Amino acid sequence: MGIGFRELLIILVIALILFGAKKLRHVGSDLGAAVRGFKKAVNEGDDESSKQLSDLTGKDKDADFQERADSAKSESKTNA
């Protein structure tokens, strides 16, 4: 149900007719810059929320993961 090659080609041809080759290149680069900016903002938000969470809990995600892994190993040894 996604966009196939034919649909993408039709969209590209229509965009080329509407904007022209020179303008289409600028629109594409502007769109790429906007997507990169959005991804950067999302990643910064994730980093900030992880930092706030570690500040609240007093430990970071890696230490918490290691603690869980160690407890799972000790449980599996006692059950064996």
Image (cartoon, rainbow, N blue to C red):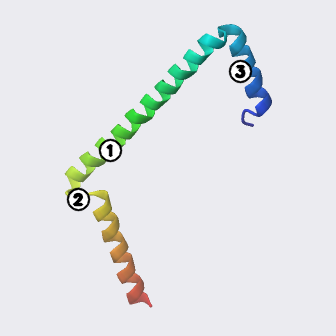
Quarter holding the C terminus is: bottom left
Residue ID for mark 3: 12
In this orientation, which residue lies closer to the viewer: 9 or 59?
Answer: 9
User: Which residue is pictured at 38% across the width and 89% down the height?
Assistant: 78
Distance Cα–Cα, label 1 vs label 2: 15 Å
Badge 1: residue crowd in 10 Å (few <14, some 14–19, many ≥20): few
Look at 56% across and 16% down and name the residue there.
Answer: 27
**Residue 47, label in figure:** 1
- Give the mark nearest the N terminus, 3 or 1: 3
Check the image and report above or below for 16 versus 38.
above
Near mark 3 (Cα within 10 A), the count class, few <14, some 14-19 or many ≥20, is few
The residue located at (30%, 63%) in the rendering is: 64
**For residue 46, which quarter of the picture?**
top left
Three-letter residue code for mark 3:
Leu
**Figure check: 53 above or below 79:** above
The image position of residue 60, as x and y in percent, is: 26, 57
Residue 13: percent from the left, percent from the top? 75, 17
Q: Which residue is mark 2?
A: 59
Check whether the beta carbons of the residues at disc 3 and disc 1 lie within 8 A of each other: no
Q: Secondary structure at mark 3?
A: helix
